[in-house]
Amino acid sequence: MLNVLDNLPENPTELRQVSELLAAEVKALTLKVEQLQHQLHGANRHRFGSTSEGMDQLQLFAENEEIAEAVTEVVETAPAEHVEPKGKPKRKSLPDHLDRIEQVLSTGEDCPECGGDLSKLGEDVTEELEYIPGRFVVNKFIRPRMACRRCETISQAPLPSRPIERGRPGPGLLAHVLVSKYADHLPLYRQSQIYAREDVELDRSTMADWVGKSTALLERLADAMGKHVRDGQALFADDTPVKMLASGTKKTQTARVWAYVRDERPWDGLAPPCAWYQFTVDRKGEHPVSHLSGYKGWVHADGYAGFNGVFGTDKADEMACMAHVRRKFVDVFTAQGSSIAEEAIKRIAQLYAVEKEARGKPSEERVALRKAKAASVFDDLEIWLQAQLPKISGKSPLAQAIRYALKRMPKARPYLNNGFLELDNNSAERAMKPVALGRKNWMFAGSQRGGKAMAIAFTLIETAKLNGVDPQAWLTDVLSRIADHKITKMDELMPWNYSPVA
């Protein structure tokens, strides 16, 4: 079309027609440039690179498969005679250079059957590799076998309950491996290399077995945390993609990790904060519906249609996220420098200024503050956006951002009248950051059961962090007690009830 500039007509009417055609062409090209700039900006902002690292990548494939296998073993096998699975590394003696902490477990001086004197026949020695922050030690349990001189009964003290029956890791070591993998994002093969520098040989597959069995043991505690989240007036929900190894192949498919967070600290609520994670093989809406079945509080969520089944009569109420609204305008402004987008960002900033003032105040005070300072700003923003839409091209990224805002704002309005609601869903988004960091390091889940183990670990570790509790110290305590703990008393093991040993 621009070729007509080489041969412009002299007739004014024809010249006007050419001018109109050129104007339409320029407008279309300008819109296309805006769209491409917006797409390029989004791609540059959100993209991440995955590099092939040869042997490291093979280690990760094996590691995640082994964790999944360990979970399967716990689920499908009953306690039976211990036989080393084929392909597993043979158990080696614990290194001689490690300190030994001896504990003598005695039955006492008198026969438990007749009260006669006991004489020592021998003893059994069991060694357990333990990790105390900063160093490895070996717990050495010495159990004398005692015989009664009167009735010849042989007695011996039992071993204390241990997280993994017939296993050799202590609770502190198991906690250290879990926290290193899911909080510090160290794959097991890297942990194995680190421990080798201390002359402690822990095979990657051995630790994978520990992770699977530990998370299976901790599952009921994670379930109790999920119930605590769903008992709240409001929760925050979000999901993020993770790769899962497709069964029978070395290829991966896209699975999801869902986070549900209860956090009443912004409105001075009494309940402790808690994050509950779930793993699914896809992003179908049936999953959040299942996770939140029976829940009738408020759910902060983005505009993903999969959450729609959660909301409705006799179901949960929806609270939209203004951070997502703001993000659309930030993308447009960054890519194009739009003055309308800039003004929208400034107006939304006024709402967040009120929220900064309201943070930590009781619910009633937050409502009064919002009505006094935020309600008019919210109303004016909605009216102003409606007025801007006819002034711009309906196909532009800016128009898309405005339409998104106008669609979500009515569902964000309830925060003005409910002090226990937040302006955004950032609590759930913060809960997703550890998953995003982790997937860059351990890359994928080995199977659906391996993904479930990951979700359990994130639930425990991130909830401890939300409560200002050292996850390693707390998990060490939990793993030393949970095998014998009644399922009806899981609340006693929660991180907010944990008291560090002085």
Image (cartoon, rainbow, N blue to C red):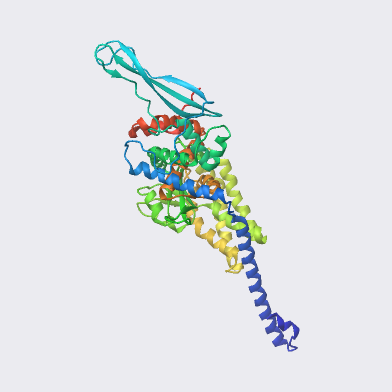
Nearest the camera: 452 or 362?
452
Nearest the camera: 450 or 419?
450
Nearest the camera: 489 or 84?
84
Q: Is residue 19 left or right of residue 301?
A: right
Residue 93 in view here: yes
In the rendering, at what x and y percent does residue 340 appear? 64, 60
Looking at the rendering, in which quadrant would you find the N terminus? Answer: bottom right
Which residue is most to the bottom? 11
In the rendering, at what x and y percent does residue 367 appear? 50, 44
Residue 423 in view here: no
Write the residue at 33% across / 42% down. 77
Q: Is residue 41 left or right of residue 481?
A: right
In the rendering, at what x and y percent does residue 90 appear? 44, 37
Q: State how many labels appear.
A: 0
Q: Is residue 400 left or right of residue 306?
A: right
In the rendering, at what x and y percent does residue 42 appear? 60, 59
Q: Is residue 89 above or below residue 343?
A: above
Q: Is residue 123 above or below residue 175?
A: above
The image quarter in which residue 313 lies: bottom left
Q: Is residue 375 left or right of residue 143?
A: right
Nearest the camera: 49 or 99?
99
Write the residue at 48% across / 24% down. 501
